[in-house]
Each structure stands twice: as C-alpha cells, then as structure tokens.
Image (tube, rainbow, N blue to C red):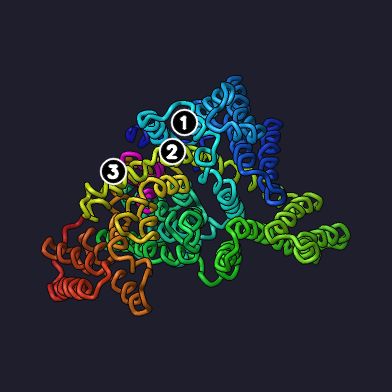
Amino acid sequence: MSENRNTENVKTADELLAEFDRESNTRQFAGIPGKLLKVLFIAFAAFIFGTRFFTLPEQVRMSSFLGIIIFLGFLIYPLYKKQTAKRNFIPWYDIVFAIAGATPYFYYAFNFREITNRAVAINTLDKIMAVVGILFLFELCRRAVGIPILFVAGGFIVYAFVYGKSLQSILFNLFYTTNGIPGTPLNVCSTFIVFFIILGSFLEKTGIGTFFVDLANSIAGYASGGPAKVAVISSALEGMYSGSSVANTVGSGSVTIPVMKSIGYKPEFAAAVEAAASTGGQIMPPIMGAAAFLMSEITAIPYVTIAVAAILPAVLYFTGIFFMIHFEAKKLGLKGLPKESIPNFFKLFFRKGYLFLPIIMLVTLMAFNRTPAQSACMAILTTMFIMLATDIVKMVKKLSKKEDIASDVIDTLLLFVPVAAFFIAMFGFGMKMENAAIISGLIYILVSFAGKQTKESGRIALDALEGGIKNTMGVTLACGLAGIVAGVITMTSLGSTLIDLIVPIAHNNLFFALFLTMLTCIVLGMGVPTTANYLIMATITAPILVKMGIPLLAAHMFVFYFGIVADITPPVALAAYAGSAIAKSNPLKTGVTATRLALTAFIIPYIFAFNPKMLFIDANALDVVLIIVTSLIGIIAISAGLERFFLRKLEIYEVIPLLVGGLLMIYPGTLTDIIGIALVAVVAVLQIAIKKKPEEKG
C-alpha cells in the first residue's frame, strides 16, 4: 500500500478525505440532481430547527430523525468506494434500500403509542420492522462509519442472546424503547450535537481554518522547525470546532505537511506531527469535538467545570508535541520560514480576529448556564451576522464609488432586517433566544437572496447547512449503534457484571484496572467518530473506574482520552494514515511516530486518575499554580528525553533521569516535585558544564 502511494501524484484534500474518512466518501452530484439533493438536505435542516418551535414525543422525534438520515444516507453513501467515481448516479437498489431502511423508523413514529401499549408482546409486523430497521442501520453505518463499530454492536447483541434474552425481548428493547436505538445517544445527537456540527460547518465557511493557519504562522513560523510548530498551533485551534481528527489532519495538513518536508523534516515525522496535533484537537477546550457538552449531559457536571478541567491536560499534550518538534529541529539544525513570508500577528488579529466571535459567544452562553442547543444556535447566528457585517462593509464601499446608488441602498438596508428581526422576536414576541436566532437566520438567508449583491452569502449559508447535515450523518448512525450497546447493557445488567468481574481481577490494583480500561477504549474507539466514541466509553468503561474509587469527572476524562488516541494508534490509525498520504510516507511508520509524539496522551490520563488535582478537583490556588509550573517543566523534560536532545545531544545516562524526573514532576505532589526537579536540574547542569561534543553530520 505504501509503495503505491509513494508513486502517486499528490491527491486533493477531498480525495484524501474520501479515502480515509468514510463520512466524506459520498457520491458526487451536479446540475438538477445536485440541486434536488440540496433541497432535501436543507428541508431536513428546517425540520431539525423546526423541532425547537414545536414539541414532539421523543419516540416520534428520534425515529423520524434517524429515518430521514437513513433515507438520505443510502442516496449519498455508495455500496463500495469506487462507486463514487460516476457522477449523478444512484443504483436502483440503493433507492429501494433508502425507502426500505427508513420505513421501520417512520412506522414506529406513526404507531409508537400502540406499540408502547403492546409492550414486549409486539406483533409479527413489529418484529419484521425492527429486524429490517436494525439491519439497514448496520449496513449504512458500515458505509458511513466503518466496520469496527459493527463488531462492537453486533457482539453486544450476541451477548444478549447468550444471556438468555428472547428475540422478541431484544427487538422490543433495542428498537421500541428509549433504552435502545432511540435512546440517550440518539437523543443528545438530535437535540444538540447536530447544532454543533452545523456550527462547525458555518465556521469553516467563514474561512476560520485559513485564519488559524495564518495566526499560527505569525506566532511560530520564524522559529526553528517553524512549519511543524505552526501545524501544532493551527490544529489545536481547528480542533476547537472540528469533530473529526481525519478532517482536521487533511484540512491543515495539506498546507503544513509539504512545508515541513521542504525545510528538512522526514515525511513520516511531518505527517505524524499533523496527525498527532489534529487528534489532540479533539481534547482541546472549549468544545472538545462536542464531547464536553455530552460529558456534562451524562455526568450532570457543569459544562464550565469540565472545560476548565480539560485545559491543563490539553496544554500538556500540545506542549509535549511542541517541544518534541523543537528538539527534533535543533537536533537536525532546521530553520524557520523567511520573515517576509510570515504575517504580522497584530495586523492579522486586528483584521480577522472577529472570526473568534462565534466561539466566544458559545462559551459565554454555556458559562451562563444556557443550554447547549441555545448556545449553538446563537453561535450559528453569530457566524451569519459576521457574514452580514462583511456584506454591509462591501456594500458601503460600493456606495461610495457609484453615482446610481438606489439599488445598492436598498440591498444595504435589507441586510439590517435580520438584526431587527432577532430583537423583535425576543423582546417583542417573547421568543426564546434560540428560536429568535433561528427566525433571524432564516430571514438573513431570504434577504441575502433578495439582494442583487448578496446572493453569494445566501448560497454560502445554504451550503453550510447542507454540509452540516452531511457531517451529522455518520455521527447519528454511530449514535444509533451506541444505543444498541447501551440497550444491551441495560437489559442484561452487563455493566454490573463487568464491574463484578474486573474489580476482583484488578484486586484493588488501580493501575491494572486503568491499563485494562485503556486497552478496551483504544480497541473500541478505532474508526469511531468522537461523540459516538465517547458515548460508548462512558457507557461501558467509565462506571468500572468510578467503582474503583476514581472521581466521576476523572473517570470520564480518562476513557475519553484513550478513545480519541485510537485515531493515531496502529493498526487503525486513520488520522496518521491520512497524514501519510499527504506526505507520501510509510503509513505504519507514520502511525508509530505519531504515537510517540503523542506519548503524553498516554501518560496524562494515568496522572489525573491517580491524582485528580491535575483536573483542579479539590485543588486550592497554590496547588493549581504548582501543578501548572511543575507539569509544564516535567513535560518538557520528557520531550527532551524522548528526542535525546536538550541543550545538546543527550547521553543515555542523561536520558533516564530526565524521563524519570519529568514523570515525577507531572505527578502532583510535593515530594515527587522535589525529586523530579533535582533529577532534571542535575541533567541541566551536566548539559551546561560538559563541553558540547562534535556531532557527526547527516
């Protein structure tokens, strides 16, 4: 596989996404078929936003939501990858599959009261519909997400049979109750995760990704190994709103990886840097691939507490990668980019800093206890207002240069209508904030198409809606299968069984329990989207750690971290393989290198599991300051030890105390800090005192 890739021309970002991100591997449509599908997707978006105005029974809302996803999914996801080559083509059987796959969910939506009254005594038609619905969910999930999650969900269904549950009981519990497919995972997906994914699509359309790369370039482009440091910073920023490690890798990696190679980094290292940084973006507050809001929903811990707790681990993760890059650059004698190619930070921030406003709006509203859906809707409206303000500035500039200005004046005045509509809806009609935002956003799109000069903005908004819905599909399908996992655990009491098995095996050995949990999370997390990934981990593994005495937040953060690093852990290291395709490097070597670069992600969760003060749990102000300072020094020491370079090349007798000292400093505690500082200080003194030895070139 790698040999073939090395002889290929560089692929486009879309081609790479289609190859490594199943969600992006969709059929291509143009002309009238493309417009018809766009209408269907936008109509679905209207349905989603419309549910904020009228209340439907949960069974109706969730079944309809998943039914529409399945119908649209079979239209755009091919049976196999090569089918995407033919434009405007849907095989006849996929049209049949779309109708047949969606029918059971609408059947349940229209008959849910009668089915609920029948309880476990469902009739033959109910059973057929449930079987068909589950089978088509599995097939579409295979196309859009991948095979690993099918084995997980399928294994749980098999366990239900082994446990002694009848087919009738399994079908009823998994398909017709809110403990199964239309359960908590699908509920949170349809209630608010969908809004965050749409927000991410809108942010992408505003050009925030390019802004983040430029901003990172202005901060670190000049430094030794500058392009690699730019990749780390930009990926951390992009990860705030991106819910996909692969999409993040391809999005910024298509720019950063070639530049890293051009200044002297090996292809495997360049690809690994981008993959590790992009994967780390999923643990970066404030959004964390929407997992922060999901974690708050599941644990009932306030969102702000979770976001604050995630700051230090995320900073340590990126600090570790940053300094490994730095020491690698120093070891190889690499330089930064020419000064003339680096933008001025202050000028750039002054011109484009407004692109941060939607994220600021989101975090601020969440901090003031607004619901995730309210906050996301307002953040989406903020992106629209940014587009609106940009249009107004353009129109005002045009007005100053023309004599016949009547039509432009009308277009400009029309752009103020959505803003007025928002305040009238809120304060005049007493609408909820998110509903006023939805009304205002709709008016903005209509007004944009009404103006002669603003049609492009309207098209961009519709494209963002369509893109957001498409990006929702894989997550929704995975959440449906996660509901199967949760349903089997509920009906068989598997959670209690696992706790009863693992806790005695661990024999109160917390490290052993954590190690087993880590392996489970990495295996179950392979190829699964961030949100569904966390849902599965929170359902299966987190309760075990809580039973072992780990605080609730620390347990959930632990399983979340190790579910995420599956994206760079061979053999299913999708983010690393996507980076290797851009760099034309060996995929396996890239995955191994990415794992080494992200080693802190394998260390930090153990630290906060043993000592939750790293998550600021039961920590006073002095504790916080000491933890931050010592942890940062410790992570730098570990990075130097792994790269075998500090102030100069490290000898083996210097590496071991540096690694041990770094680990001791990361672990919160006065004694460990003192020993760690002493060990690191000894190495630092040796580095300074001993004359630098001449090193071989090459």
Q: What numbered label is drawn on residue 521?
A: none
Q: Amino acid at mark 2?
A: Met
Q: Name the residue beneath numbered marker 1.
A: 170
Asked if marks 1 and 2 touch (Cβ < 8 Å), the reply is yes
Quadrant occupied by the N terminus: top left
Q: Amino acid at mark 1?
A: Ile
Q: Position of residue 491 (x, y in %)?
A: 43, 38
Q: Position of residue 673 (x, y in %)?
A: 23, 73
Distance in Å between CA atoms under marks 1 and 3: 44 Å
Magenta residues, as a range? 561-579
The one of 363 and 24 positioned closer to us in this rendering: 363
Q: Is residue 686 magenta?
A: no
Location of residue 401 (image quadrant): bottom right
Distance in Å between CA atoms under marks 3 and 2: 43 Å
Q: For marks 3 and 2, give the one nearer the viewer.
A: 2
Asked if marks 3 and 2 touch (Cβ < 8 Å), the reply is no
Residue sitting farthest toward the top: 92
User: Disc 1 or 2, which lies upstream in sequence?
Assistant: 1
Q: For marks 1 and 3, give the one nearer the viewer.
A: 1
Q: Position of residue 475 (x, y in %)?
A: 51, 43
Point 33% across, 76% down: residue = 623
Provide the secondary structure element on which disc 2 rests: helix
Q: Name the residue beneath numbered marker 3.
A: 589
Q: What numbered label is drawn on residue 491?
A: 2
